[in-house]
Amino acid sequence: MARYELVKRSVALITLTNPPVNALSSAVRHGIAKTMERALSDPKVTAVVICGENGRFCGGADIREFAGPLRGPPLVPLLDLIEAGEKPVVAAIEGVALGGGLELALVCHYRIAHFKARLGLPEVTLGILPAAGGTQRLPRLIGIPAALELITTGRHVSAQEALKLGIVDQVTEQNACEVAVEFALRAIAKPLSSRRLSSLTTPCPPNLDALLEAVTMQIQKKARGVMAPLACVQAVRAAATMPYSQGIKRESELMATLFHSGQARALQYCFFAERTAGKWTLPSGAQWNDTKPREIRSAAVIGLGTMGRGIAVSLARVGIPVIAVESDKKLLETGRQMVIGMLERDAKRRGVSASLNLLKFTLSLEDLKDVDLVIEAVFEDMALKKSVFRELSKVCRPATLLCTNTSGLDVDALAGVTDRPQLVIGMHFFSPAHVMKLLEVVCGPRSSSETVATAMSLGKRMGKVSVAVGNCPGFVGNRMLKPYSDQASFLLEEGATPEQIDKALEDFGFAMGVFRMSDLAGLDVGWRVRKESGLTGPDVDPKNPPRWRQGRKYCPIPDMVCEQGRFGQKTGRGWYVYDKPGGTNAKPDPLIQNLLETYRSRYGIKPRNITDQEIIERCLFALANEGFRILEDGIAARPEDIDVIYLFGYGFPRHRGGPMFYASMVGLQRVLERLEHYHQAHPDVPHLEPSPLLKKLVACGSPPVQKWREHIKTMHSHL
Ligand SMILES: CC/C=C/CC(=O)SCCNC(=O)CCNC(=O)[C@H](O)C(C)(C)COP(=O)(O)OP(=O)(O)OC[C@H]1O[C@@H](n2cnc3c(N)ncnc32)[C@H](O)[C@@H]1OP(=O)(O)O
């Protein structure tokens, strides 16, 4: 796990060998300990270079080992030994030096980085802190403010920025290992004491307390309830106020509180879930690693509304020529200006030039005859979408992939009107499409494996986290949203207010509660869908009981809000009131309070006190319960996929892991009991009835989320 060679007759070259990222597994730590001992004790060796195999220095501790007991040599004494050695040690950083990898580099006396390398201490994103001296050595090297920023955010820096900050001594465009060997030979005669970071005094700003206070407040505002960044601040404070020997103890104490926390488990689960989500399998057996995607050299987007504009920008900024289509001149011109503006702003922010030459705007579908792939992003109306797909079928060459950006309509019904159902697939982007990372790739029963592979690979190319899902109304994300938001509406009936529900959800960790989020998205969208599906509006049978639709309990309050022209932020009024249309400062509105009181008295509902616990349980357990049904139905392949969709598309707090992981952390038995309790109280709400899969998992002893798959017997997988 660490290779030893003697180069240039006197330099020991130690190469970490643990593909793919040379993580510091117990075997690698053992390898480093053995090879370092050999290098330090061999009189022929005058200097040491440490590098990583395959152009990657080191991706840090092996995160998979965190779940088990510590085996092999602990890192801190090993790193102290390297730093204390009397022979100069040089880190040759190629690829990445992250977490424990950077901590290893920090105990080397010199650091040479390849110009493409990235460095950072991302432990905070895994719910822990850099506990191999990182919080003590980095502030001593680059000062408190810069170290605090890097450690509390986990941000990676480029080699160039690392040089500016003083983290590395040299950046090279050549082979970093060869440069490091030459560097090491020159360093032999030089004294090492000033290169041992643990022996240095931390440069301390005069306003230390004010700085730490400001950073703490910023964290509490941005990452409400998240423990690790606050612990990082305390560890950095120790670097500023204590000698190294005490600071390292403080670092270790803080790590001990974080290491076994539920937040750390959740965040580490998210890390792997994100990587698992890209690994799709179809009922045919075809899967991500045996199906070659097609190369997409040109694309088209139909419809330049909010979604279409974002999609066009996402394609153009990764170098794909895009033809954008609108139905009339005015809309085309507006769309053109918006797309160009968005692309220019995006390019400015990234410090690159805007690829405007890749854009073409047209009113004619005929212009799409030669493109490789089309993404339809017209209004969410089946008849309209079908007419577009019929037309595309006529004008596009037979090999063109036809994708629909629908948020819940039947992808197979669209495939059915084309001459190539195997090349039709859903690409459900989230608004704003050039910002939001999630892409649901909706596989119809007739979508070919090559089509799935191509949509997934295009998503990756656009920087999206793509998840393959099956075809059903609302797919995964929006299907689960319904029970969640229905519960919020029922809670309004029973006595809660929008602000109370939002606060409970925001205290849980959501960036926005369900009502503030609906105001942002626009209330009219859901209203239109409910009208189309006959839940409200003129098509509802007048004989229908008032709070009852399609055989189940229905809350008409959201419709009543819309009937008053309150569509959310864009109209300046929704569940809240805003200073002006388009305003973002939500204030509780007495008119909504009135509406709720009138509604309750009309239906004889006596308002009751509702606790935050009930809000969280009813909203989130109903959400997870639908997730279990989605797994049973084979619409999502694994719980990780559902969690990734909720993390990246719906703002579920990452330190809670996603709805399915959260349910497993609460305990499936407890979730089952609470759902049974609420279903007993509300027997007319089917979403509260515990799903068979939840019951089955409880009966099997509530296995960990990673094992649920073994208990899901899907007869008709849609994936
Ligand atoms: C006491 C000492 C404590 C130290 C604390 C730490 O060091 S915590 C770990 C800190 N390091 C990180 O957080 C880095 C995590 N990794 C990444 O950010 C990225 O993987 C990467 C290194 C930037 C490489 O990205 P890339 O996109 O090229 O590859 P993948 O992300 O897809 O990863 C490839 C596979 O490698 C697995 N993996 C990556 N890092 C680790 C790790 N540190 N431990 C274990 N496994 C790791 C990843 O899961 C992928 O595996 P697959 O099986 O192929 O999905």
Image (cartoon, helix red, strand yellow):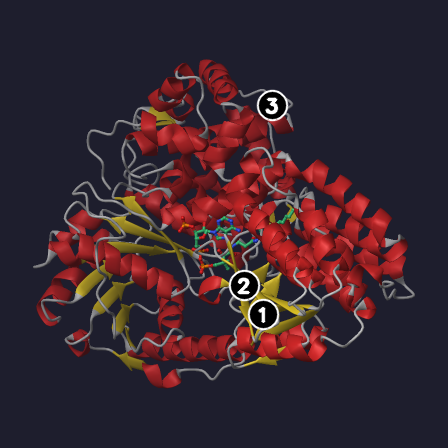
Image mark for residue 92: 1
Q: Residues within 10 Å of mark 2 (few under 14, many from 20)?
A: many
Q: Residues within 10 Å of mark 1 (few under 14, many from 20)?
A: many
Q: Residues within 10 Å of mark 3 (few under 14, many from 20)?
A: some
**Residue of label 2:** 57
Q: Which of marks 1 and 3 is nearer the N terminus?
A: 1
* Label 3 – label 2 distance at C-alpha: 62 Å
Label 1 vs label 3, nearer the camera: 1
| Amino acid marked by disc 1 | Ala
* Tag 1 and tag 3, C-beta contact below 8 Å: no
Hey, which quadrant is residue 205 in on the image? bottom right
| Closer to us: 604 or 487 | 487
Element type where label 1 sits in the image: strand
Image mark for residue 607: 3
Position of residue 453 in the picture relative to residue 226 (left or right): left
- Residue 24 x %, y %: 56, 50
The quarter in which the C terminus is drawn is top left
